[in-house]
Amino acid sequence: MTSLVTCSEGDLRKSVTYLQTAYSLKGEEGITRDDVLEIIGVIPEDVLKQFIQGCASNSYDKIQAVVNDIIAEGHAASRIIQQVFDEIVIIPSLGDDQKCVVAEKIAVIDKCLNDGANEYLQLMALATTLQQQMASS
């Protein structure tokens, strides 16, 4: 229930829709937390951690490999940037100025994605910006 409330951002209509969708897929088997997260499109925590660790590694090749994996797995770039933003805010090693730079880049990337930009290029832009900010902390 906690995951459902968090992912639906407190919107009861969204929650009901997610549950209806999960029930139509799972039926009498029962609905698990993983079922709800999959329907909502939440990026698994391990994928998100790999992305952030890749940025912290200060290796362009590692970032490229992580972004390639994310794209190959079919994750939506818009969902990645949303979840990265949520994670960036709580990283204690980044200062407020660095978080602002990353947040501004996320806003620009979100606009570009809404305009139809290439997801790979936008994720690489986010990753390299995050890498620069993490390296300067």
Image: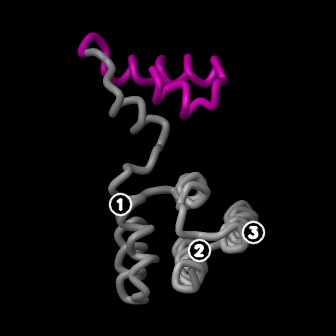
Tell me the crowding category of disc 2: few under 14, some 14 to 19, or many 20 or more residues within 10 angstroms, Cα based: many
Q: Position of residue 107 (x, y in %)?
A: 74, 64
Tell me the crowding category of disc 1: few under 14, some 14 to 19, or many 20 or more residues within 10 angstroms, Cα based: few
> Three-letter amino acid code at disc 3?
Glu
Span shown in magenta: 1-29
What is the chief secondary structure element of the magenta stretch?
helix
Tell me the crowding category of disc 3: few under 14, some 14 to 19, or many 20 or more residues within 10 angstroms, Cα based: few
Q: CA distance from mark 1 to mark 3?
A: 27 Å
Quarter of the figure with the N terminus: top left
Compared with residue 6, is residue 121 higher up or lower down, i.e. above or below?
Answer: below
The residue that label 1 is drawn on is: 73
Residue at x 54%, y 72% (from the top left corner): 123
Residue at x 40%, y 65% (from the top left corner): 70
Residue at x 37%, y 88% (from the top left corner): 61
Q: CA distance from mark 1 to mark 2?
A: 18 Å
Looking at the rendered image, the disc whose residue lies closer to the viewer, 1 or 3, is 3
Q: Position of residue 103 (x, y in %)?
A: 70, 65
Kindly indicate whether the residue at mark 3 contacts the one at mark 1 (C-beta within 8 angstroms).
Answer: no
Q: The residue tagged with tag 3: helix, strand or loop?
A: helix
Q: CA distance from mark 2 to mark 3?
A: 10 Å
Q: The residue tagged with tag 2: helix, strand or loop?
A: helix
> Three-letter amino acid code at disc 1?
Glu
Q: Position of residue 96 (x, y in %)?
A: 70, 67
Image position of 136 (left or right of 19): right
Residue toward you, 74 or 110 = 110
The residue that label 3 is drawn on is: 104
Image position of 41 (left or right of 113): left
The residue that label 2 is drawn on is: 126
